[in-house]
Amino acid sequence: MLLRRIYQFLIIYCLGVGLLFLLKYALGLSDYVIPSPAEIGRTAARDAGPYVLAVLNTLAVAVLGHLLSIGLATAVAILGRLTAWIGSFIRTAAYNIQAYPIVAVAPIIFILLGDGLSSRLLIAAMICYFPLLLSFIGIFSEPVADIEHFYHATRRMTWRLEVKIRAFENIHKISTVLVGSATMAVVGTIVAEFIAATAGIGYSIRIALYQSDLAKILVALFLIGVGTSLYLVSLEGLGNAFQARLKRN
Amino acid sequence: MKQALTIFLVVIFLFACGQKEKEEVSYRLKWLYNVSSVGDLYADVHGYFAREGLAVTVKPGGPERDALKEIELGHAHFGVASADQVLRAVAKGAPIVVLAQLFQVNPLHWIYRPDRTPFTSPKDWRGRVLGVTFGGNDETILRALLARHGIAESELTLFSVRYDYTPFYEGRVAFWPIYLNAQAVIIGEKLSRAGETYAFVSPDELGVRFVANSVVTTRQMLERHPDVVRRFLAALLAGWRAALDPQNEEEAVRVLAQTDRETPEAVVRRQLPVTRELMLPAAPGTPFGKIDVAAWKQTAAIMAAQQLVPEGLPLESILATDWVPSP
């Protein structure tokens, strides 16, 4: 699975970079507009080390932000399933807050929390939290009538059992949502770093943009792609293992 | 009736023959419309380009827009770029030529509070927190100042600067990079209202002459369409001279207010004299827009010392020093 993900990413990356080279040589553009393969190679040799560390830094924050969002979204969705009104209220709030562009909200966050880890974490969490929340509310509010009826009839239903039944019956959907939101957590972290942090690959990309250095950006994009693929494969592996264990039990 | 129609058609024909076709030219600014582009807009609004037979589209720049790339890609004919951008581009083979230098003194300064952190020379920076945009030209300028005055980076703290001035307002950062003719007027006013004093550190006065905005085009444009280049430059620089003339101040404010609606006219009125000081050549008789070759050489040397560009860039072929018309 890992190899497949990586080579799929490599195909997409190579196609994109190949298109840039085609444009460069067809139009006779300088290395300033589109760097040559040699220029990208030199940049990779020089900057890959610090960039790998920056990507790992970003991934660490993204994973933390993602976990934070999963925990929070699960808690709020469990509360939201209690009554239709609360569920609808949370949904409205989520849609509204999600509509605010993060670049407009970010300065407020940075004034309150500074430009350190907590701001990056919060922005990463914010970007992947609301899609997670909306999916979880949908999953946890939807009764699994066939199974729940039995427990209701025998008066053995508890809120924990209800949540477990709904989670179990929708485990495939939950797994897909978690993997999908992982990409958003990575994106959110990079956006936060780009806007105001002083660490991570988003910050490195910002500096490269100031220097109009597309070679650095291409190296950074490559490493982000590899890092994100690894994270997604790990999540899918965890999801599959969890589902297999549930089936065995 | 037939006679009237014939006369009408003849008049139309003569009118059409009398109309000289204007050449379409695109001009990409370095930044969003603000006081640093007042002359560009003045030249456009007051028909300076039209009188030279040019239909110029003045496009705003921005953080993600690079005039040099647009020029090379053919999306713009002329543009505004800072010297560091030009030198980086040329070092990577971009066929860029500098036609005129708009700022004679770089507007980038550092604002500070003299009562809290007195400053007489960069040696006073020891132990202080200084704002810097990592990757920006202020980082290059600051490092040049530190090297020139023998200060190691470990002797001070560098703070990564963004658009939010809160760390400076709160006093966490003692020196903050700022454009003297743009934000400095607004930030200075806020500090004055709060009863605080402020002053500016000028890299130029400390011996670092790092060139800022210049007008650029491609070598191909210069060689194939020298007449268009000459007419464009004549119109543009005439527009700038008029915009910076104190007698035209109200009109310059009005022209800028039409495009930059975010900045109050009262602020623009205070920004204009500062812009004038930074742009007009100090030596009498020097034409507006003259390329300061010595400053370019120093800029290239600073960047080479910091390994941002290779040594020995062919400045004589980058700087088209004989294109600025005399007033």
Image (cartoon, rainbow, N blue to C red):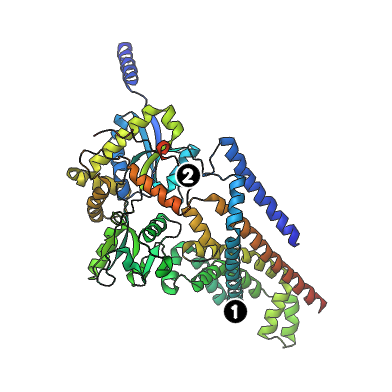
Local SS, label 1: helix
* Relative to A241, residue A12 above or below: above
What residue did someone put label 1 on? Answer: A75
Q: Is residue B227 left or right of residue A87?
A: left
Q: Determine which quarter of the picture holds residue B320.
A: top left
Residue farthest to the left?
B247
Which quarter shows the C terminus of chain B? top left
Q: Is residue A102 left or right of residue A73?
A: left
Residue B89: image tag: 2
Q: Is residue A111 left or right of residue B47?
A: right
* Relative to B252, residue B111 above or below: below
Q: Residues within 10 Å of mark 1 (few under 14, many from 20)?
A: some
Which chain is indicated by disc 2? B
Callout 2 amino acid: Ala
Q: Is residue B199 visible?
A: yes
Residue B164: image tag: none
Q: CA distance from mark 2 to mark 1?
A: 53 Å
Local SS, label 2: helix
